[in-house]
Image (cartoon, rainbow, N blue to C red):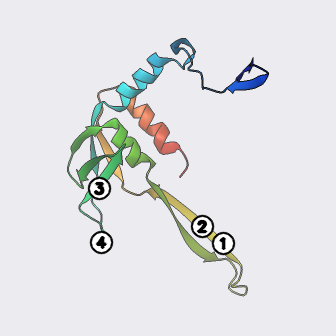
Amino acid sequence: MAKKQVVAGIEILDDTPTIDPVSQVADLRELAASEVFMNEMVEVMVHSSTDENQAPHVILNCNGTNQPILRGVPTRVRRKYVEILARMKETKYSQVTRNPAAPDQIDMIARHGLAYPFEMLSDENPRGRAWLSNVLAEPA
């Protein structure tokens, strides 16, 4: 909140932002534990594609750092890159005409899936599998 001060009949507002003390910031231990968890090394494999136009690798980017992963090759990466893979979902639609006599009545059927299907090969943290299941269960 801006402080108001009157000097020689002139009202002066001080709207300098205040800095919250560390005790009022969200639990830093929880934030640090989350950062440690997301930087743990895990082993994943991005599955090969039957699409000849797909590149033989996937390049993930987190905060300006690229992480290439070759398809079909087990790769050790930080968990934060696995989260990116798990959130890369796509939706494709099919048109279905229920009544051939009324071709203008079309239903759109959605299919959701991972843009780059992958498999978690090893995760030493017991919370890791449950975490990945929760991320994958989120809507596309």
Question: Residue lying furthest left in this view?
Answer: 73
Identify the secondary structure beneath mark 2: strand
Q: Which residue is mark 1?
A: 107
Identify the secondary structure beneath mark 4: loop
Tag 3: amino acid = Val
* 103 on left or right of 89: right
Question: Which quarter of the figure has residue 80?
Answer: top left
Q: Earlier in the sequence, mark 2 or mark 4?
A: 4
Tag 1: amino acid = Asp
Circle 3: is it few (<14), some (14-19), or many (20+) Cα within 10 Å? some
Q: Nearer the viewer, residue 59 or 131?
A: 59
Q: Are marks 2 and 1 in contact (CB under 8 Å)?
A: yes
Q: Which residue is mark 4?
A: 53
| Above or below 81: residue 94 | below
* 41 on left or right of 38: left
Tag 4: amino acid = Asn
Q: Which residue is mark 2?
A: 109
Q: Residue at x 35, y 25 (%)?
A: 36
Q: Are marks 3 and 2 in contact (CB under 8 Å)?
A: no
